[in-house]
Image (cartoon, grey):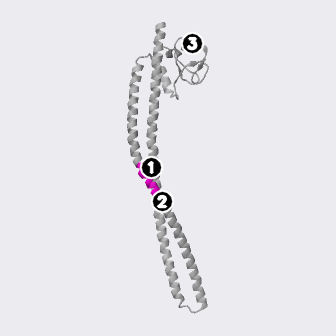
Amino acid sequence: MVLQLKMNLEYFKILRELLSLSQKIDDLNFNKKDELERIQRLKTLINDHENQSKEIKIDLNTLNQEYLNKESILAKLQQQIEQHKKNEKNLVTQQELDSYQLQLVKIDEQKNELEESLFLILENIESKEKAMFECNDFLLGAKESLLEISNDVKEKIKLIEGEIIDYEKRIILLQSEIPTHFKKAFEKTKKMKLKKSSMSFIQNGQCSYCAYKVNSIDETSIETKLEIHHCQSCQRLILPYAINTN
């Protein structure tokens, strides 16, 4: 009986190390995912700015075409004004003069409206060109950063995967040293993917993690008989306190 208790105590120590290694692997996988997401976030930003650059280019082409069209119309109006002024000399009656003056006023109003419209288009073009410059400037820097970050992440992931392989080898070795019911306890606890720690102790009759009250029968089973139990509340594996003192 004493020998079995000693063996169980050693098994619990191995079980604690197994769960600790499993947690380290989870943390490393999280770090790996975080590094890959860092690249993806930058790629998304680059993609967004590339799309923005394409949209600005389309807008600029539209504005430039609109400017050329209105500039052509303005040139024709200017020709009409000059022609009206020439023709005005040949008018005889006051009625003809008044009619020509009225036409000239209307043409002049159209000309002023077009000139104002052209000014607004030029302002818009200037704003779009500034946005295009800023967008392309960002893309230039971001693409350089992406290359640097990708190389950095590649090295980090290589180190992370190396650590994971080492831990997995250690886990396989340790599992060969414990009986089946301890292996099952390890697998059960590992699959739960519990946050922070997957282990707990009994403190003042409670689970040290969630403060759930452990009944006296279970406490005796854990601390005296060194049997496997999980907290009924947080599902963490409750380790016997003796593994900290032996």
> Looking at the image, can residue 127 be seen?
yes
Identify the residue position indicated by label 3 in the image. Answer: 220
Residue 67: % across, % down: 48, 69
Determine if the magenta segment contains residue 7. no
Q: Residue furthest bottom?
A: 92
Label 2 or label 1, whichever comes before in sequence order? 1
Residue type, numbered disc 3:
Thr
Residue type, numbered disc 2:
Lys
Question: What secondary structure do most residues of the magenta stretch adopt?
Answer: helix
Residue 185: % across, % down: 49, 20
Nearer to the camera, 182 or 145? 145
Question: How packed is label 2: few (under 14 Cα within 10 Å), some, or many (20 or more)?
Answer: few
Q: Which residues are magenta?
A: 130-143
Residue 136: % across, % down: 43, 55
Spatial CA span between label 2 and label 3: 75 Å
Q: Are marks 1 and 3 in contact (CB under 8 Å)?
A: no
Judged from the image, the secondary structure of the residue bearing numbered disc 2 is helix
Question: How packed is label 3: few (under 14 Cα within 10 Å), some, or many (20 or more)?
Answer: some
Spatial CA span between label 2 and label 1: 18 Å
Report the residue at 48% width, 59% height from top: 130
Report the residue at 41% width, 20% height from top: 174
Q: Is residue 78 above or below residue 6?
A: below
Judged from the image, the secondary structure of the residue bearing numbered disc 3 is helix
Total marks in image: 3
Determine if the magenta segment contains residue 132. yes
Identify the residue position indicated by label 2 in the image. Answer: 130
Identify the residue position indicated by label 1 in the image. Answer: 46
Label 1 or label 3, whichever comes before in sequence order? 1
Spatial CA span between label 1 and label 3: 61 Å
Q: Which mark is residue 25?
A: none
Report the residue at 57% width, 15% height from top: 219
